[in-house]
């Protein structure tokens, strides 16, 4: 069995040429004799076989182009299609086609165009921008961390107050501290968050206002530091269960600080409407003072005679002030009873007589008003006494037994001397009159 070496078609034993593509067999014998010119004559033709169809077709390949036969193609999976390697040509990185320029040698590299230069510089610019952004982010994180350390973490670790506030040692409130930094040399010391302990050092009167100087100590033990910066600290002066003075103070603008084991000092002022006793008659050694953080202030700060004193707002509402004022009146009546007894048989002057809810002097009198009038008179005339009219025969006989009466406590030899005293001290006839106290 033979096959065409060109197209692979099957060949017969006597086929010289492929019936599909016309390719001559490689193993076909070559004839030595060349036909003469008489080959075309009749006798020669008669020697040819009668059946021409059975003879191979004589086709001169040099005279006729072979016709491409319809050759069955093998499947792609069986024989891969041959690939023709292309000559390698170096391409620029930007994959832009290079157009040959006349006169330029074939092997010479073409000069890069402007767009190629810009495209090559963009990666460098992008890398520079990214680097700058990273550096800026690192710097920002470092700054935030530093601020957190200085303002939050370090103060909490050391137990010290904010540096901005701890640098204040004195102010218009008159506060001073034995340690103005508030930091302790003991690394374990922490600022006490509870209300501190207050102790009375001294007191004084600035006009009608009571000024009390205090020593303040952290209440969490000797290992804690003091940092009083609350904006509503209630300070109450007491005699047992009796409230003698009460007000709310703001320490946030000028904190009070001290190291562990040490104390600080401050002075607070109670306006005349914020204390309910006679300071000169009190036993200060037996008085105590308490502090409360986060108290509710009733209104604004009180107005003081001395604007440099540390003023506070009212700690009690109207009902609370009425209660402590009534208690103060009762205590004073009991205190003054012996002094009133000493006036028996002498002339003195009566300065006021008031009832609760009495309409006089353009207002309805309250216990707070009655107490305030008594304190005013006491400040100007120290011998003034307060009594309840129902306790004394003089007023019982006249039927005026439900009045709070204030006497000057001064004694006179006659009624005329009493009138002279009233006139000399600026009282009118309705505000001052001499009486014989029996």
Image (spheres, rainbow, N blue to C red):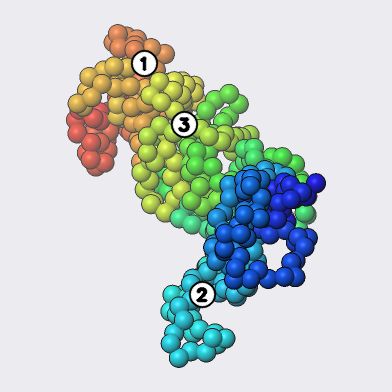
Local packing at callout 2 (Cα closer than 10 Å; few below 14, some 14-19, many 20+) is: few
Local packing at callout 3 (Cα closer than 10 Å; few below 14, some 14-19, many 20+) is: some
Dot 2 falls on a residue whose secondary structure is helix
User: Contact (CB < 8 A) between labels 2 and 3?
Assistant: no
Q: Earlier in the sequence, mark 3 or mark 1?
A: 3
Closer-to-camera residue (54/17): 54
Q: CA distance from mark 3 to mark 1?
A: 38 Å
x, y percent for residue 241: 58, 23
Position of residue 237 in the picture relative to residue 185 (left or right): left
Closer-to-camera residue (146/78): 78
Q: CA distance from mark 2 to mark 3?
A: 70 Å
Examine the image and state in which quarter residue 369 appears: top left
Label 2 belongs to which residue?
A: 121
Label 3 belongs to which residue?
A: 296
Residue 281 visible here = no
x, y percent for residue 311: 43, 45
Tell me the number on the disc at residue 223: none
The residue that appears at 44% across and 28% down in the rendered structure is 316
The residue that appears at 71% across and 51% down in the rendered structure is 15
Q: Is residue 190 above or below residue 242?
A: below
Dot 3 falls on a residue whose secondary structure is loop
Query: Residue extending furthest right?
Result: 1
Closer-to-camera residue (138/49): 49
Q: Is residue 28 above or below residue 288?
A: below
Residue 362 visible here = yes
The residue that appears at 56% across and 36% down in the rendered structure is 293
Q: Is residue 263 above or below residue 384?
A: below
Q: Earlier in the sequence, mark 1 or mark 2?
A: 2
- Report the mark closest to the observer, 2 or 3: 2
Label 1 belongs to which residue?
A: 389
- Report the mark closest to the observer, 3 or 1: 3
């Amino acid at each position: 069995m033979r096959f065409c070496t060109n197209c692979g078609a099957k060949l017969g034993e006597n086929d010289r040429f492929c019936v599909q593509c016309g390719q001559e067999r490689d193993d076909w014998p070559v004839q030595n004799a060349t036909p003469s010119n008489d080959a075309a004559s009749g006798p020669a033709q008669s020697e040819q076989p009668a059946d021409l169809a059975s003879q191979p077709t004589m086709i001169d390949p040099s005279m006729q182009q072979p016709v491409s036969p319809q050759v069955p193609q093998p499947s792609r999976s069986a024989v891969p299609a041959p690939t023709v390697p292309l000559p390698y040509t170096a391409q620029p990185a930007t994959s832009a086609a290079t157009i040959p320029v006349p006169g330029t040698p074939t092997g010479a590299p073409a000069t890069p165009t402007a767009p190629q230069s810009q495209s090559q510089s963009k990666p460098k610019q992008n890398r520079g921008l990214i680097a700058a952004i990273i550096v800026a982010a690192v710097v920002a994180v470092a700054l935030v961390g530093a601020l957190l350390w200085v303002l939050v973490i370090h103060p909490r670790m050391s137990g010290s107050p904010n540096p901005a506030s701890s640098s204040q040692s004195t102010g218009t409130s008159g506060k001073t501290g034995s340690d103005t930094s508030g930091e302790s040399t003991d690394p374990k010391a922490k600022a006490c968050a509870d209300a501190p302990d207050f102790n009375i050092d001294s007191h004084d009167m600035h006009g009608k206002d009571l000024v009390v100087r205090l020593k303040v100590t952290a209440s969490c033990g000797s290992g804690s530091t003091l940092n009083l910066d609350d904006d509503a600290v209630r300070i109450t002066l007491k005699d047992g269960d009796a409230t003698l003075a009460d007000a709310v103070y703001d320490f946030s603008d000028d904190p009070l600080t001290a190291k562990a084991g040490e104390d600080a000092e401050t002075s607070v002022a109670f306006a005349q409407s914020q204390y309910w006793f006679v300071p000169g008659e009190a036993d200060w050694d037996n008085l105590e003072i308490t502090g409360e953080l986060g108290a509710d202030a009733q209104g604004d700060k009180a107005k003081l005679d001395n604007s440099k004193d540390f003023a506070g707002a009212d700690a009690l509402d109207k009902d609370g002030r009425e209660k402590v004022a009534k208690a103060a009146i009762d205590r004073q009546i009991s205190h003054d009873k012996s002094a009133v007894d000493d006036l028996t048989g002498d002339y003195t002057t009566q300065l006021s007589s008031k009832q609760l809810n009495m309409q006089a002097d353009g207002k309805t009198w309250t216990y707070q008003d009655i107490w305030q009038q008594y304190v005013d008179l006491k400040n100007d005339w120290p011998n003034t006494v307060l009594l309840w009219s129902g306790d004394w025969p003089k007023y019982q006989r006249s039927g005026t037994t439900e009045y709070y009466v204030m006497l000057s406590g001064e004694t006179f030899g006659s009624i005329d001397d009493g009138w002279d005293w009233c006139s000399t001290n600026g009282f009118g006839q309705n505000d001052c009159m001499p009486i014989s106290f029996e």
